[in-house]
């Protein structure tokens, strides 16, 4: 509030006019409403409530922006009080206020100030104008998505050109139907065996990648083989064609299937019963392996029982891009090669024989990792001469080290390769060692000639240090005799090849006796002080 006290004396009238006009000249004014009102504009502010906006034609289609637009404004209104004062305010030169006295006396000239005036703004769109539409309602702008694209909503003061904007990004996640153009099968031919692998799996791939992958399956001769969901099952010897069709199209892919029967022919010699020994189990030398991308690992496998009629093993991989397989002729071993670009992925490699299988999980990694532990599936095992046995080795999680297999020196008793132990022609006891880096595990194998049996007398004995006893054969085959004897701990007890055992120090030892006919038996000895 500004006040001027005016004394209207005759002698001072000209002097007052001069002073008042000087004050008025110092003000920059804009007359807005009446002859006695002065208006001064200040800073203009224009802003929007958000700088970016994400919309989706198939999802969130609309959003709102709030506008803030005003300017600081000083409005000065000149008044004279009291109402019966001997003075008046009139419009002077150039629209400036001028005080005129009406007579002798006093009057007060006053002014009042107000602020904040809303500013009307212009709204425009730049960029992809077809991507959105908008509606202005007072200080609110409603934006709606129309198609994928990028646009900018701009708010501008038409006088000062001050502006602010909001960048709008419109997506369209509407699922589009992709029409199929073709279909392929992962196998063109498939051979099944009524006495072996009775089932096989076909995988259909519909092109392009985004198309619906559904197909229907059909066998040209369901008496030979049936198909359901890509799984083909052998029914009888013969040939058939499996067809995969994309529904609603003429797109097809085929696989030629042949069913065989490897059952051994019957022996006409009635003195020899024709007996087929079925495979009950397939054992691989590992259940899980970790392989560096681009590197290889070799595993072994056998069937159980060892006298199974059909011992042939076939190997397959679920994902060739992750790991490929190359098996030996008889399937006793397989080399697994990890894909060069398969790091971080895994697949399953399967060993099959006569409908039975063993699965190995193959994990492909970027970097090699050393072994900190090695474990074997067995600590001891018994075999007949000529038999095979697979030992399953397990390393610590993530270890990529190669396992080295070895056998203790015992000529003609057993050999080991890729975890598969093959018993030789001679009876005896050997130790199989699986070693990776500086860690290892052992398995003691006892090999006996098939059908050879023996019982020792005694089977267990407690003696004192420096005392002795002799092991004898109690139940034996006619003409059999002791061939050799060994002690598992010579520091505790020693033994001669004639079976004489002598205590050396307190402890326990196993005395293994091998007979001339290939029987193997053990006597457990405890030595006390």
Image: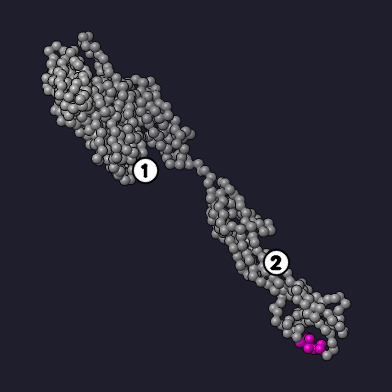
Residue 528 can be seen in this image = yes
Residue visible at 14% across and 11% down in the picture: 478
Q: Name the residue under label 2.
A: 117
Residue 201 circle label: none
Q: Of callouts 2 and 1, which one flags the residue occurring earlier in the amino acid sequence?
A: 2
**Residue 17 located within the stretch drawn in magenta:** yes
- The reply, left or right, for residue 212 in relation to residue 322 is right
Can you say which quadrant of the picture contains the C terminus? top left
- The reply, left or right, for residue 432 in relation to residue 43 is left
Residue 286 percent across, percent down from the top left: 30, 33
Can you say which quadrant of the picture contains the N terminus? bottom right
Residue 78 percent across, percent down from the top left: 78, 76
Q: Determine whether 387 is above or below 335 in the image.
A: above
Q: 308 or 109, which is in the foreground?
A: 109
Q: 302 or 275, which is in the foreground?
A: 302
**Residue 488 located within the stretch drawn in magenta:** no
Q: Residue furthest top?
A: 270
Residue visible at 69% across and 58% down in the picture: 138
Q: Quadrant of residue 68?
A: bottom right
Q: 201 or 480, which is in the foreground?
A: 480
Residue visible at 72% across and 75% down in the picture: 30
Q: How crowded is mark 2: few (under 14 residues within 10 Å), some or many (20 or more)?
A: some
What colouring does the structure picture have? one colour
Q: Determine whether 275 is above or below 212 in the image.
A: above
Magenta extent: 12-18
Distance (Cα) linking label 2 and label 1: 64 Å
**Is disc 2 placed on a helix, strand or loop?**
strand
Q: Mark 1 points at which residue?
A: 344
Q: Determine whether 166 is above or below 463 in the image.
A: below
């Amino acid at each position: 509030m500004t006040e001027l006290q005016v004394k209207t004396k005759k002698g001072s009238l000209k002097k007052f006019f001069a002073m008042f006009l000087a004050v008025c000249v110092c003000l920059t004014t804009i007359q807005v409403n009446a002859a006695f009102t002065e208006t001064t504009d200040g800073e203009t502010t224009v802003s929007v409530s958000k700088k970016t906006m994400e919309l989706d034609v198939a999802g969130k289609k609309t959003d709102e922006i709030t506008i803030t637009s005003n300017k600081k404004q000083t409005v000065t209104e000149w008044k004279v009080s009291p109402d019966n004062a001997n003075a008046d305010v009139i419009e002077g030169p150039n629209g400036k206020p001028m005080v005129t006295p009406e007579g002798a006396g006093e009057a007060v000239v006053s002014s009042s100030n107000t602020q904040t005036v809303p500013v009307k703004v212009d709204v425009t769109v730049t960029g992809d104008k077809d991507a959105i539409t908008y509606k202005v309602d007072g200080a609110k702008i409603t934006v709606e998505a129309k198609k994928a694209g990028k646009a900018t909503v701009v708010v501008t003061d038409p006088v000062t050109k001050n502006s602010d904007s909001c960048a709008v990004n419109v997506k369209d996640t509407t699922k589009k139907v992709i029409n199929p153009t073709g279909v392929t099968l992962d196998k063109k031919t498939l051979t099944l065996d009524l006495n072996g692998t009775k089932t096989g799996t076909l995988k259909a791939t519909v092109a392009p990648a985004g198309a619906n992958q559904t197909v229907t399956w059909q066998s040209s001769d369901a008496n030979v083989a049936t198909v359901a969901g890509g799984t083909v099952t052998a029914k009888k010897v013969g040939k058939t064609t499996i067809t995969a069709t994309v529904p609603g199209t003429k797109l097809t892919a085929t696989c030629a299937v042949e069913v065989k029967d490897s059952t051994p022919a019957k022996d006409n010699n009635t003195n020899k019963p024709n007996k087929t020994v079925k495979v009950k189990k397939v054992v691989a030398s590992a259940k899980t392996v970790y392989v560096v991308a681009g590197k290889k690992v070799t595993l072994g496998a056998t069937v159980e029982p060892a006298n199974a009629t059909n011992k042939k093993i076939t190997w397959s991989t679920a994902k060739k891009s992750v790991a490929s397989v190359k098996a030996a002729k008889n399937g006793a071993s397989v080399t697994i090669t990890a894909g060069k670009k398969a790091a971080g992925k895994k697949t399953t490699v399967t060993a099959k024989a006569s409908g039975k299988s063993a699965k190995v999980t193959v994990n492909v990694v970027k970097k090699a990792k050393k072994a900190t532990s090695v474990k074997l599936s067995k600590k001891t095992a018994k075999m007949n001469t000529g038999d095979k046995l697979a030992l399953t080795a397990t390393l610590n999680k993530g270890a990529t080290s190669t396992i080295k297999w070895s056998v203790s020196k015992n000529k003609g008793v057993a050999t080991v390769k890729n975890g598969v132990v093959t018993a030789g022609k001679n009876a005896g006891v050997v130790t199989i060692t699986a070693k990776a880096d500086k860690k290892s595990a052992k398995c003691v194998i006892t090999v006996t000639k098939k059908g050879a049996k023996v019982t020792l007398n005694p089977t267990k004995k407690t003696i004192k240090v420096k005392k002795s006893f002799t092991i004898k054969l109690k139940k034996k085959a006619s003409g059999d005799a002791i061939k050799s004897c060994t002690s598992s701990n010579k520091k505790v007890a020693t033994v001669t090849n004639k079976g004489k055992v002598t205590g050396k120090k307190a402890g326990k030892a196993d005395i293994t006796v091998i007979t001339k006919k290939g029987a193997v038996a053990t006597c457990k000895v405890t030595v006390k002080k």
